[in-house]
Every structure is written in C-alpha cells, then in structure tokens.
Amino acid sequence: MECDKCGESAVMHAAYSGLHLCEEHFCRSVDSRVRKRIREDALLSEDATPEDPETWLIGLSGGKDSVVLTHVLDDVFARDPRVELVALTIHEGIEGYRDASLDACLELTDDLEIDHEVVSYADEYGLEMDDVAEDDPLNMAPCAYCGVFRRDALSQYAEEYGADKLLTGHNLDDEAQTAMMNLLSGDIQQVAKHFDASLGSFEEREIDDDPFVPRAKPLRDLPEKEVALYAHLRDLPTHMAECPHASEAYRGEIQEHLHALEDDHPGTRHSIMSGYEELAKLAAEAYRGSDDEAQGSCERCGAPTNNDVCRKCELVEAVGGEQAETVE
Ligand code: SF4
C-alpha cells in the first residue's frame, strides 16, 4: 500500500480516517495532532513569558504513552523559554517491574536533558505495592489501591514542586474506556469531575478554585496502537512489560468491547469522546457550586473530601502504611 501523501510505502492504515501513511507522514501527523490538542486546550497560558515561564510536570512511567508524550513535548517546547519541562516517575515498589521501566525513563530524560525526579510509595506512605497486593486487607484489586496512591503522589509532588500543570500520557483508548465506565456506572458526578479534572480546554474548565495542580492529557486524540507505532518508529526507549499486579478486569472488558466496535464501526472511539466531552461539560457546569462538590478537607492530609478522612488516608491506614501528618 502507498502513502496517500507522497506515494512512499505506507507503514499504517487508519480505518477511521481511511488514510494510508508512510513513516514520515505518520510521525508528522502524530506531532501535529498533539500540537493541535495543546493549542485547542489552551495549555500554554498567555501569561507565560521567558522571564516567568510555566513549569509542566510530566508523569513519566517509562511506558510507551508517557515516553511519547515526553518526546513530543520536548520537540515542541525545548526551545520555547516560556515552558520548563520536568519529568516525574512514581516508584510503586513492584520488584522487577518498576526498576526496569525506571531505566527507560533515565535514558530518555538523559537524552533530552530534561530534569527527572523519582517519588516512591515507600517514602511517601511507608508501603510497597508488592506487600499491598499480597496482604490485600480490603479484598480489592491491587490497582484500586495503587491508582489512589499514584494520583495522590503525582498531585502532592506537583504542588510541592510548584508546577503549573501536570501532564499525563493517557491516549484515546484510555479516555474512551474511562468515558464508558463512567457512563455505565450511572455516576454523572464522576463525568462532571472528569471534565474539570482533565478533559476540557483550560478556558472552559474551572481551575481557579481547584486545590490541585491542573492536569492535561495532550495524547488524548491518539489511538493506543498509533502511540505504540510512533514509539517504535522513533526508536524511543520504552518499557513494554505488563505490571504483575495488573488487575483492572472491568476496564479490560470495556476495552474488548470497544475494540470490537472499532473494528466493525471505525471512528467509534472518536465519536464517543466528542459526545462525552459535550455531556461532561454540561454536567460540570451543573455541579459547580452545588452541595455535591467536595466542601471539606481531610483531617489528616488536608485533601478535599466530603468525609472526615480522604480515600488515600483510609487506604494508607488499611494497609498499615505511615499516615500523612495531621493538618493543624
Ligand atoms: Fe499499580 Fe495496577 Fe498499574 Fe500495577 S497495573 S502499577 S498495580 S495501577
């Protein structure tokens, strides 16, 4: 098959667009979709200047998504004095898994000359995910603990570092799965939170009163397979092994359904996200200022919550970790 742009040999066919692209035109199209998303989300504030740049903290796991995100951001902003990029890797304490992916992170950040920080669950919460998965005191899937700890560690570090934005490598498949899981759960408040947390543009989201560093997902228009192909074609250092505790069974089920739908009806993931984003925006507007918004703060760590103690502090206590300091 030939590239629709130049006639060279094609390396991919996107059924949802009908396009066949060669290596060069495929990589250019990935770069331009990420740039377009950054523009449309108004990611770079108009107030950012060379004298007063924004700091963007990138969640870098060493997997293909965060590696591609870091590579493209460096490509776009390495010579832009209005932005400083910093990468952060969370070490969960999973033997034989995170150490290997940390190598990929170090290789990439050395190569790009980006500052790289590492935060561990051991230092933050006095626990390791290997022990949590083995003990499982609440009889939950390991990812149910780990996801809460990771979100908290990223947010806390972003705050302490003084970052202006927190960027993660979620791709189109991740976002379409989350959208379907939120819709199928019937939890519209969760849909509203998804919008303000990371979906809409910075001009539409309510971030001024948000106690967390605002998040963004510049890869959210790119299908997972295209992110993997880009990492391969650009020969980026990635760690492809799966976590031994991976356990999100429901997400896997949704993923299978979405793959089947996409095969039969190309473009399904894009159309889900375009409709969902509109719905999420309406839901976010309806919930702002309502009684359902988190009004209080955790008595142990100060995180916003409607309960006395936030979910992260509950879980740290349940697994026998070290509690965060009490807020005065
Ligand atoms: Fe944590 Fe689950 Fe990811 Fe493993 S797969 S790192 S347990 S969230």
Image (cartoon, helix red, strand yellow):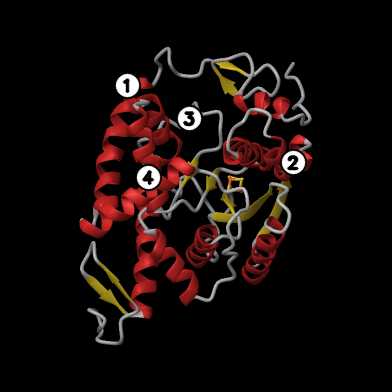
User: If you read the primary sequence from the N terminus, does the residue marked by circle 3 or circle 1 appear first?
Assistant: 3
Quadrant for residue 78, please give it.
bottom right
Contact check, label 3 and label 2, Cβ < 8 Å:
no
Which callout, 2 or 4, points at the residue further toward the start of the chain? 2
User: Is label 2 within 8 A of ligand 1 (CB to nearest ligand atom)?
Assistant: no
In the rendered image, the vertical position of residue 314 relative to residue 224, given as above or below: above
Q: Position of residue 252 (x, y in %)?
A: 44, 47
Where residue 190 sits: x, y (%)? 41, 29
Image vertical order of residue 235 relative to residue 320, above or below: below
User: Which numbered disc, 2 or 1, marks the residue closer to the eye?
Assistant: 2
Q: Earlier in the sequence, mark 1 or mark 4?
A: 4
Residue 220 location (% of width, % of height)? 39, 52
Instruction: Look at label 1 and name its amino acid.
Output: Ala
Q: Amino acid at mark 2?
A: Asp
The x, y position of residue 72, in whole percent, is: 48, 64
Q: For this view, does 159 lie left or right of residue 39?
A: right
Q: Image check: 63 left or right of 217? A: right
The one nearer the camera, 312 or 184, is: 184
Residue 124 image label: none
Residue underneath mark 3: 208
Assess mark 4: CB under 8 A from ligand 1?
A: no
**Residue wearing tag 1:** 286
Depicted 112 relative to depicted 47: above or below: below
Give residue 254's quadrant in the image. top left
Q: Is ligand 1 within 8 Å of the beta carbon of the residue shown at mark 1? A: no
Of badges 1 and 4, nearer the viewer stands 4
